[in-house]
Image (cartoon, helix red, strand yellow):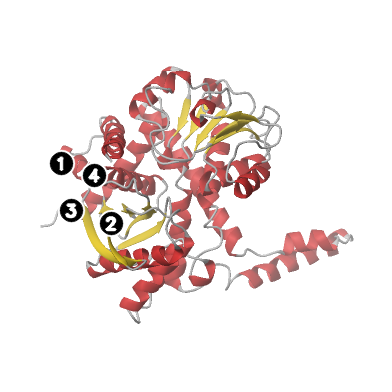
């Protein structure tokens, strides 16, 4: 436990160091900067749950880092390693992540000390509902107050339980489904949410690879994903989807690292087949013609164009940073690179695409889900057919003017209107592209060398504007 708490403190200290460095470029009042940095509220709770005929006391926590915009937003993780400093660090990152991609939320995070892998579904439901009830009693959850989402150890199932608990205790509230995001589609969720973080990582890497000036510094030839060699740490939701979309766009996944070890193949690894192998055998090891790495951390030190840590925090630290040979480190996870490690990586000329930008796809699509819940209508429902009718008239006019007919496939492709998932992906892509160029603009204007400092500074300035506009009350 002491070691876990120490890791949490390291993580929080690292986030604060990143903040302080970026804040040194800002001209905001020191008091405003102090407010932006500080966690506004921390709620810790212990509650009894009956499990297999005996009563166990479960610990939970919810941290709301910033209320400069409401609701606050952040996931809930189920893990025996949950501790206050770790949750504070994650809540702090959420504030800046939302600001970087212009999602109008404050940052929050929650955690429950339970092992989801060894707990029964019945136990998980009891714990989830009781934790939700504790938050509801204190008005710490709601579509206008604080909106949780899935995180490590939780998923759409747990979010559905929370939504149902909220609806039961807030009976008749019109916007009740907006109390939580990441729900199943049939329970008010949104299409495209499951892969959103990984898809956002793909968009971010793709945008960076197209940045000629930045790639020259990194020593990378070619401005597309085609042929880029990628090592992924973590084959969970984020790692799998990011690797899948990168592979679809021509990247070569040469390594996959997981808890039990890693696999490596210079000719490339089929991500879907590797995932299937792990699901069937319980281990990533011994897949196809791949070389096994008994210690998965060693795999991170192999040469590649892009290293994608998509597991947990503090994975690249002062102990192993000097041995990292990637040209780009894309932080799919929250806080995988410590402040000390970052200094070493930057000195080596390695480009770091920071977490508060590149893994913001999840909260971006969560924002879309929240909007859907408040409007109580599926995206595309009212406009899709009208859009198709307009396209059909245009296609007919083209055929008449040209005297040539299109094939049925061509017509269907051109006529198709936008459905929910296409609108969600379009909105996510636009968000990631705009945020990337905004960060690069800050780097150029302020003569900042690294993307993380520029991203933090961009977020700090936006939050500062909110506080200055709101004023200090009373």
Residue 31: mark: 1
User: In the picture provided, is 383 more to the left or to the right than 355?
Assistant: right
Q: Secondary structure at mark 1?
A: helix
The residue lying at 38 percent from left, 33 percent from top is 314
> What residue is shown with label 2?
60
Instruction: Report the mark closest to the observer, 2 or 1.
Output: 2
Instruction: Report the mark closest to the observer, 1 or 3.
Output: 1
Asked if the residues shown at circle 4 and circle 2 are in contact, with their CB atoms under 8 angstroms apart, the answer is no
Labels 4 and 2: the sequence-earlier one: 4
The residue lying at 48 percent from left, 62 percent from top is 156
| Total marks in image | 4
Asked if the residues shown at circle 4 and circle 3 are in contact, with their CB atoms under 8 angstroms apart, the answer is no
Q: Quadrant of the C terminus?
A: bottom left
Q: CA distance from mark 4 to mark 2?
A: 25 Å
> What residue is shown with label 3?
471
Q: Could one spot residue 178 in this view of the protein?
A: no
> What residue is shown with label 4?
36
Farthest residue in the bottom direction?
172
Labels 1 and 4: the sequence-earlier one: 1
The residue lying at 61 percent from left, 36 percent from top is 285
Label 4 packing within 10 angstroms: few (<14), some (14-19), many (20+): many
């Amino acid at each position: 436990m002491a070691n876990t708490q120490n890791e949490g403190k390291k993580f929080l200290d690292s986030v604060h160091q990143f903040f302080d460095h970026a804040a040194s470029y800002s001209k905001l009042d020191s008091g405003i900067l102090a407010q932006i940095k500080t966690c506004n509220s921390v709620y810790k709770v212990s509650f009894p749950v009956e499990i297999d005929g005996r009563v166990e006391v479960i610990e939970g926590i919810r941290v709301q880092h910033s209320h400069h915009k409401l609701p606050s937003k952040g996931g809930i993780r189920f893990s025996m390693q949950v501790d206050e400093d770790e949750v504070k660090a994650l809540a702090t990152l959420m504030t800046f992540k939302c600001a970087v991609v212009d999602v109008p939320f404050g940052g929050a995070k929650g955690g429950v000390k339970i092992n989801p892998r060894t707990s029964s579904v019945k136990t998980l439901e009891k714990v989830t509902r009781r934790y939700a009830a504790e938050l509801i009693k204190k008005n710490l959850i709601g579509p206008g107050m604080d909106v949780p989402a899935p995180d490590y150890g939780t998923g759409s199932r747990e979010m559905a339980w929370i939504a149902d608990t909220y609806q039961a205790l807030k009976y008749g509230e019109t916007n009740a489904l907006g109390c939580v995001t990441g729900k199943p589609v049939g329970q008010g969720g949104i299409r495209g949410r499951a892969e959103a973080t990984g898809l956002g990582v793909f968009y971010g890497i793709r945008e960076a690879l197209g940045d000629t000036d930045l790639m020259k510094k990194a020593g990378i030839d070619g401005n597309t994903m085609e042929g880029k060699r990628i090592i992924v740490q973590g084959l969970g939701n984020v790692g799998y989807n990011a690797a899948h979309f990168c592979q679809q766009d021509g990247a070569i996944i040469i390594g996959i690292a997981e808890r039990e070890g890693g696999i490596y193949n210079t000719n490339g690894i089929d991500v879907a087949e590797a995932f299937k192998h792990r699901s069937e055998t319980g281990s990533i090891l011994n897949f196809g013609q791949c070389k096994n790495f008994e210690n998965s951390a060693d795999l991170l030190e192999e040469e590649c164009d892009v290293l994608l840590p998509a597991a947990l925090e503090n994975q690249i630290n002062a102990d192993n940073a000097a041995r990292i040979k990637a040209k780009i480190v894309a932080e799919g996870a929250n806080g995988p690179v410590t402040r000390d490690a970052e200094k070493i990586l930057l000195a080596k000329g390695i480009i770091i695409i920071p977490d508060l930008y590149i893994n913001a796809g999840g909260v971006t699509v969560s924002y879309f889900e929240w909007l859907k819940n408040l409007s109580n209508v599926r995206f595309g429902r009212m406009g899709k057919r009208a859009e198709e009718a307009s396209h059909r008239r245009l296609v007919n006019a083209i055929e008449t003017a040209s005297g040539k007919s299109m094939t049925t496939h061509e017509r269907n492709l051109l006529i198709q209107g936008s459905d929910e998932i296409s609108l969600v992906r379009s909105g996510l892509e636009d968000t990631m592209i705009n945020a990337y160029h905004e960060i690069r603009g800050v780097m150029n204007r302020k003569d900042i060398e690294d993307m993380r400092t520029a991203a933090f500074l961009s977020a700090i300035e936006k939050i500062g504007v909110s506080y200055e506009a709101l004023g200090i009350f009373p």
